[in-house]
Amino acid sequence: PPLCLRRRTRLLTAPEDTVQNRVSLEKVLGITAQNSSGLTCDPGTGHVAYLAGCVVVILNPKENKQQHIFNTARKSLSALAFSPDGKFIVTGENGHRPAVRIWDVEEKSQVAEMLGHKYGVACVAFSPNMKHIVSMGYQHDMVLNVWDWKKDIVVASNKVSCRVIALSFSEDSSYFVTVGNRHVRFWFLEVSTEAKVTGTVPLVGRSGILGELHNNIFCGVACGRGQMAGNTFCVSYSGLLCQFNEKRVLEKWINLKVSMSSCLCVSEDLIFCGCTDGIVRIFQAHSLHYLTNLPKPHCLGVDVGQGLEPSFLFCRKAEAVYPDTVALTFDPIHQWLSCVYRDHSIYVWDIKDINKVGKMWSELFHSSYVWNVEVYPEFEDQRACLPSGSFLTCSSDNTIRFWNMDGNPDSHWQKNIFSNTLLKVVYVENDIQHLQDTSHFPDRGSENGTPMDVKAGVRVMQVSPDGQHLASGDRSGNLRIHELHFMDELVKVEAHDAEVLCLEYSKPETGLTLLASASRDRLIHVLNVEKNYNLEQTLDDHSSSITAIKFTGNRDIQMISCGADKSIYFRSAKRSSDGLHFVRTHHVAEKTTLYDMDIDITQKYVAVACQDRNVRIYNTVNGKQKKCYKGSQGDEGSLLKVHVDPSGTFLATSCSDKSISVIDFYSGECVAKMFGHSEIVTGMKFTYDCRHLITVSGDSCVFIWHLGPEITTCMKQHLLEINHQEQQRQQQPKDRKWDSHPRQETYASMPSEILSLSPGEQTEDEMEEECEPEELLKTPSKESLDPDPQCLLTNGKLPLWAKRLLGDDDVADGSAFHTKRSYQPHGRWAERADQEPLKTILDAQDLDCYFTPMKPESLEDSILDTVEPQNLAGLLSEVRPSPAYSPCPMPSHPGLGSPQEDGCGHSSFLPLQRESPEARELIIYSLEAGMTITGTDRWVPFEKEVESGPGDQQGDSYLRVSSISSKDQSQPEGDSLSITEGRHSPCYYLNILEPSSPLAESPTLPPP
């Protein structure tokens, strides 16, 4: 059934390119360069480019600014190189039939695409004269291509039987050198390309003469510059630096005295060799004379927050371990050397004076799968343990990292010397063995290069609502609680037998402080935070991994969980003598695996990400599905994550095809779609300022997306509505008393089939909501935008982040939101001939909208159940005025008073105030014949009541169905149309207009 939702500001239906551009990538925190092929420098500007998933990040170290080029093919990038003039970048990629692509740096657009490999591109390079591009395939590909990239043709090609790791062009573009497993080979372009043929010619290659070093694996190569132009330098994994002369003969070699070396870079005068343990050795180019070492970076396990003084970097501990150097590139203009280390950190060193080297810029990133991201809550007072706008990420590298994007965090958090964005790193169990990324390198310990323990790392985390505690679950099943002021570990529990998959703190408005943890071992543990995380209950309803768990409810706490067993369980809390227990209230069994879920700000709806790429919306109270729409724009994969933004306007989804979508929560329309991660997106969070979306992925990168102004405006507009509604509620008198006999107020239309409602099935908010036909749930054009309703979206105080947001300059200006407060009805019978809304009947068949009566104080107060006359005469003779029930007049024309506006632009049919119960008058009319109810094929007698009151007209009449079935006098169970005592069945009204009524002649009234 369609979701009963109000109209609100929606984005215009946009062409494909607009959907792509509504969200832009602002910052990348991460690097996926595995060797020097993934790092390059613009020789003109000094900008450094490196790989991050499917994105090329172009960094300006001086200003700490990033630019981004997206690989539109959505394949992870494997290699890149700047052109000599800095205007173009060439990239290679992984995957089937990978392309070599040329990108315009200024336009960020693709210039050329060249297909010539099968399995992946290991390295690429521009020739110094910019005529040619060389691309080398992976080991199984074995193809080496030379391209005339402006004509998009292969001019020369050859096969290489062994693995090639690096290549370098000579300064005069006449040859290039490839190195790899027992391989150093010189390839000559002049001989190959001087023949005037149109087709591809074989590339001419000659092996370097290695002599006794022929068994080495060479991992780095650089052709000499300047006076050393004829020479070639290579470095081997075993730690040897070799020099070949112009005749390809190994002239000299030096033992670097390290356990392993991995990369090489040269300037006109110097040679830099990157080695293990953070060592970079510097030699003179012309003599291979050893000069010095570059300063080492941070040690593994460094307390980033302590590094406030530059001298901290040069304080060395004897037992400290340093990350291995894996990639180097040199900027000849500024004399800067950029180094990438194996723990995914980057340093830019200023080496104008090699005896006084300074650090220009650095950043420390996650080195393995990033599993989760949490945005730190906002606080008004001094309770906050982190500056405003901070967020946390956790990873398989066994760390939890605290980041802040603001340029001026609080004075309590001084900028450290290691990073502009990283505030602190928590090393879980002080374990540093997983900090170095061993997935792509030969490992010192094992020959196959696999990590020692693949089950390491922090899988999930959650910040407590008061901002004081951080709960984290690891991949071994341990649950830890850290105190956020001093990062002390308060509690460690071996809670589960398998990895912890979800953690959730209960909201403060529930009045309880609980923490639920769920795992692959199918168990849910509920812990009491106030009792030092004592176990309250363990639930074992699920038969497979539990993928998500959420608390909801404002007065009565509820817990909802979903799992790979395709089930959603709704539970409510019951207090007993021995504590709190959750009891199952609803169980939804789907036909598809459920991977994630989130609850919107109203606490009424839960959005579930499903394997069939759909988002299903359920009512949190009754567990009924309200809506289902596509959560991914592609036709492959499963929906893995869903996250509703803080205003409840949009939700973000991630799919296993590595794409991210931003979707209108109410209409299901895709507002924006993004890509850029090279592995699945494992976590997403909107920031509280409604300006950013943070995504984390298995590629070890954190992407910070900037939401377009139209998206931010929609979210802020929704928050303004919350604020307005909150103020209205606070202005209402709190001592308002109900009548001694509460009236049952029920409005419904005549559906074609009987629809019963069970107790608690719909909340009062839902009774007020207007359901829209399907076509009206689509995004309207700008001219037809309806005013945004002032929805009741929160109980209690507005959260601080929302208040702050509403205080922003750009929001306070009401002109930003032009909203007209006129309500236009939607529905078949909703317009009169003179275009005034008709507000007497809602057509439930079209609108699919149900309403529930209020329950009387006691059963004795209501005689409605006992009024079951068998015929019309009985009905007319037995009926009496009942104090427990007074029908609510529904004005049908101006003489009766217009329906009251509920502040949302929607008419709500409120009862007219009466001066006293005695002022009521009951008028009974006889009917000459019964009336048939559509779809029931039964004759129903009616009771007609008219109430007079201030502004009432005597001629107005309403009919109440109170008897059924002239055939069967015994009134079978479940087949009744009588009004019962609580919320067990809907009450039906028919509006019979007197001939004198102005609406009686209206041609738009529905037929009976």
Image (cartoon, rainbow, N blue to C red):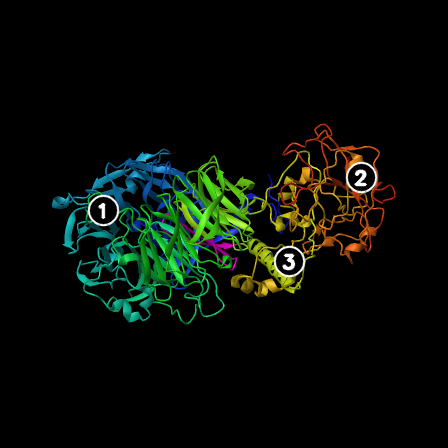
On the question of residue 918 being in view, the answer is yes
In three-dimensional space, the C-alpha distance between marks 3 and 1, rounded to whole angstroms, equals 59 Å
Q: Are marks 3 and 2 in contact (CB under 8 Å)?
A: no
On the question of residue 640 being in view, the answer is no
Q: Amino acid at mark 1?
A: Pro
Rendering coords of residue 101 (x, y %): 40, 43
Which of disc 1 and disc 3 is earlier in sequence? 1
At 28% from the left edge and 69% from the top edge, which residue is drawn? 312
Classed neighbour count for the residue bearing mark 2: other residues with Cα under 10 Å, few (<14), some (14–19), many (≥20): some
At 28% from the left edge and 71% from the top edge, which residue is drawn? 311
**Residue that carries the numbered disc 2 in the rendered image:** 876
Rendering coords of residue 217 (x, y %): 19, 45
Rendering coords of residue 714 (x, y %): 59, 54
In three-dimensional space, the C-alpha distance between marks 2 and 1, rounded to whole angstroms, equals 94 Å
Q: Amino acid at mark 3?
A: Phe
Q: Quadrant of residue 542?
A: top left
**Residue that carries the numbered disc 3 in the rendered image:** 817
Q: Residue furthest right?
A: 996
Magenta run includes residue 193: no
Q: Secondary structure at mark 1?
A: loop
**Foreground residue among 268 and 404:** 404
Q: Secondary structure at mark 2?
A: helix
* Up/down of 118 relative to 723, above or below: above
Which numbered disc, 2 or 1, marks the residue closer to the eye?
Answer: 2
Which region shows up in magenta? 685-707
